[in-house]
Amino acid sequence: MINLKNKRITVTGGAGFLGKHLVAKLKERGCKNIFIPHVEDYDLVNMEAVKKLYADAKPDIVIHLAAKVGGIGANRDNPGKFFYDNLMMGVQLMEVGRQVGIEKFVALGTICAYPKFTPIPFKEENLWNGYPEETNAPYGLAKKMLLVQSQAYRQQYGFNSIFLLPVNLYGPGDNFNPNSSHVIPALIRKCIDVQKLLRAPKGQSNLISSITVWGTGKATREFLYVADAAEAIILATERYDNSEPVNIGAGFEITIKDLVQLIVKLTGFKGKIIWDKTKPDGQPRRCLDTSKAAKEFGFKAKIKFEAGLKKTIEYYKEKA
């Protein structure tokens, strides 16, 4: 087990949604030497910037969270960019980490790496049994290459790297930008913003009393509260030293239709829900087998889904 307290830890994406929660938890554990590279200073798609990062931070451990991400629409509009940027960031960070001899590299993959028709629950050994769902395949495959690299580097160089596969995250601090957000923050924003419009003074309200949701509502998803995800990553960093992939999730699935109904209830939205069936559902079902994470490093999600949603809704109401 690694004692992280006195380690120099670099967290790429440390200023982002998951990164902020992870850094906070590292500090709770007594970690004082945490380096967070900001995109303005280090464009990690560029090899020279990656080398500069290692020279400046001199890390013992790198936790690689940085990614170009988005919902179905963003993936569909930017397949080339999502592939290239995610691939180059990860590949170069791990390669230079190997060159300078860091103690450990923690790579974050994505549930999008799984084949489109993976049996439920997704088991790690099913990861290579087919092609990912088409709308986010470039992103998912770029991330999956880090698993290939991790295993190859351990085999050839004895490089200590691990690969974690988190499900969709949600919680306070999520991305609520309508152009790039995932389903939970997108739905929360729609429900709350419509209600704000309806409460506007007479003459200022356009009386929109409906929200539009992509797809049929039949697809299922699994969601993990962001603070739970941060805890899982830290436990794996401390206790797991193997390049075999590990799922990080809550071990449940919910249909998009039921998710919409739950968010409607929790936000108090009273309007109409319009399903735009011309838009894609994405992967038909998603639910992880999380037994390996429990066995290998003792992780089990703690925050119940409805409680996590309430915290996320309150966060958006305060920030909106």
Image (tube, grey):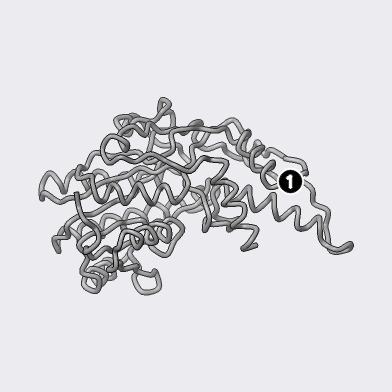
Q: Say above or below: 194 vs 151.
A: below
Identified at 34% across, 30% down, the residue is 123
Q: Say above or below: 137 vs 67.
A: above
Identified at 24% across, 58% down, the residue is 4
Q: Residue furthest top?
A: 119
Give the total of numbered labels: 1
Q: Nearer the viewer, residue 263 or 203?
A: 263
Assign the C terminus to one quadrant of the image. bottom right
Identified at 21% across, 64% down, the residue is 6
The quadrant holding residue 48 is bottom left
Q: Residue furthest right?
A: 202
Name the residue type under label 1.
Phe
Name the element at disc 1. Answer: loop
Q: Position of residue 87 (x, y in %)?
A: 32, 53
Q: Nearer the viewer, residue 273 or 278?
A: 273
Label 1 sits on residue: 269
Q: Say above or below: 245 vs 59.
A: above
Q: Position of residue 141 (x, y in %)?
A: 35, 44
Q: Position of residue 157 (x, y in %)?
A: 10, 50
Q: Nearer the viewer, residue 54 or 15?
A: 15
Q: Position of residue 82 (x, y in %)?
A: 42, 53
